């Protein structure tokens, strides 16, 4: 015998099937507003003396001869060769390569009074080849050692700018799977509270674990089995902005900023 359910009992199921899934507050494309950035208080400590550039505050720290030639460098996860070229008493050019391909260039220019450095850069190491260009401003905290180049000393990063490709990211919550994509080709799909998932297109092999903490989403980056960074993304009550916190777990430095939904 065929049983036909009363229409009244079918309507809720029909309506539920027809209704679109409610969007999560994290869903959408977000643009970082660097004017709101509270940059890390951790100083940038570097020196260029005796023909060698050293970055003591980098994670990991490294050194490169400043002779304008390419040199193998062990330690950094996103590049394996560096080049440092002294242009003049206030200007230095940098370049990095990974497996023979240039993935980044930058120039440090120190002001005439020696108290400010402006760094301009081009990051060309993205998954899809879309470059990110930008700049940052640093204010001197400690003087350069006697005889060292003007870029030497301790500095505080006070401002940052980036091209659009470096500012946007798109989130979508699909059930319990948080999905991220970027204009530069990196992406992931990670289950909330689940195992680490790969960042597709990341040359360092970074994995991410994600979880919900109150209204916020927390992303922990893992390399070689060890946590290296943690980010939180918390949508505002009106869903228009995203409070972002990014912590480097290796040196315990944190940067905070706001992103706006497009």
Image (cartoon, rainbow, N blue to C red):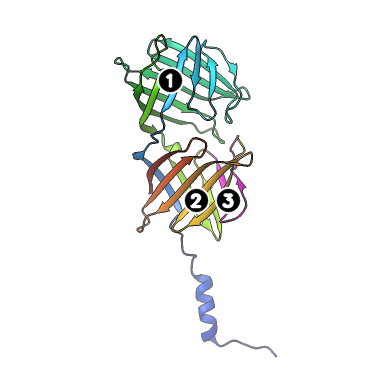
**Residue 83, above or below 195:** above
SS for tag 3?
Answer: strand
Q: Point out the tag, 3 or 1, that comes first from the N-terminus.
A: 1
Q: Is residue 262 visible?
A: no
Return the residue nearer the eye: 220 or 108: 220
Separation of residues labelled 3 and 1 (CA atoms): 36 Å
Return the residue nearer the eye: 254 or 205: 254
- Residue occupied by mark 2: 218
Q: Point out the tag, 2 or 3, that comes first from the N-terminus.
A: 3
Magenta-colored span: 185-203
* Label 2 with label 3: CB-CB less than 8 Å: no
**Residue 166, above or below 150:** below
Q: Point out the tag, 1 or 2, that comes first from the N-terminus.
A: 1
| Residue that appears at 57% across and 23% down | 97
- Residue occupied by mark 3: 189
| Side of 160 where 176 appears, left or right | right
- Residue occupied by mark 1: 107
Separation of residues labelled 2 and 3 (CA atoms): 14 Å
């Amino acid at each position: 015998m065929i049983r036909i359910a009363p229409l009244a009992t079918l309507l809720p199921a029909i309506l539920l099937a027809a209704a679109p899934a409610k969007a999560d507050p994290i869903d959408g494309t977000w643009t970082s507003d660097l004017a709101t950035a509270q940059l890390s208080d951790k100083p940038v400590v570097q020196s260029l003396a005796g023909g060698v550039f050293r970055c003591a505050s980098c994670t990991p720290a490294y050194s490169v001869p400043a002779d304008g030639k390419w040199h193998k460098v062990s330690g950094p996860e996103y590049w394996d060769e560096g080049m440092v070229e002294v242009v003049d008493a206030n200007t230095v050019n940098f370049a990095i390569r990974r497996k023979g391909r240039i993935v980044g260039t930058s120039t440090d220019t120190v002001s005439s009074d020696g108290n400010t450095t402006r760094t301009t850069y081009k990051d060309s190491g993205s998954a899809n080849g879309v470059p990110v260009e930008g700049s940052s401003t640093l204010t001197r905290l400690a003087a350069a050692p006697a005889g060292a180049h003007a870029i030497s000393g301790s500095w505080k990063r006070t401002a940052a700018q980036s091209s659009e490709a470096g500012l946007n990211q798109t989130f979508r919550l699909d059930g319990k799977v948080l999905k991220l994509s970027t204009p530069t080709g990196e992406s992931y799909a990670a289950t909330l509270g689940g195992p680490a998932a790969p960042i597709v297109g990341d040359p360092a092999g970074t994995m991410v674990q994600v979880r919900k903490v109150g209204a916020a989403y927390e992303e922990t980056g893992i390399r070689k089995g060890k946590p290296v960074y943690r980010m939180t993304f918390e949508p505002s009550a009106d869903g228009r902005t995203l409070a972002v916190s990014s912590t480097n777990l290796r040196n315990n430095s944190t940067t905070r900023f706001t992103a706006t939904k497009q």
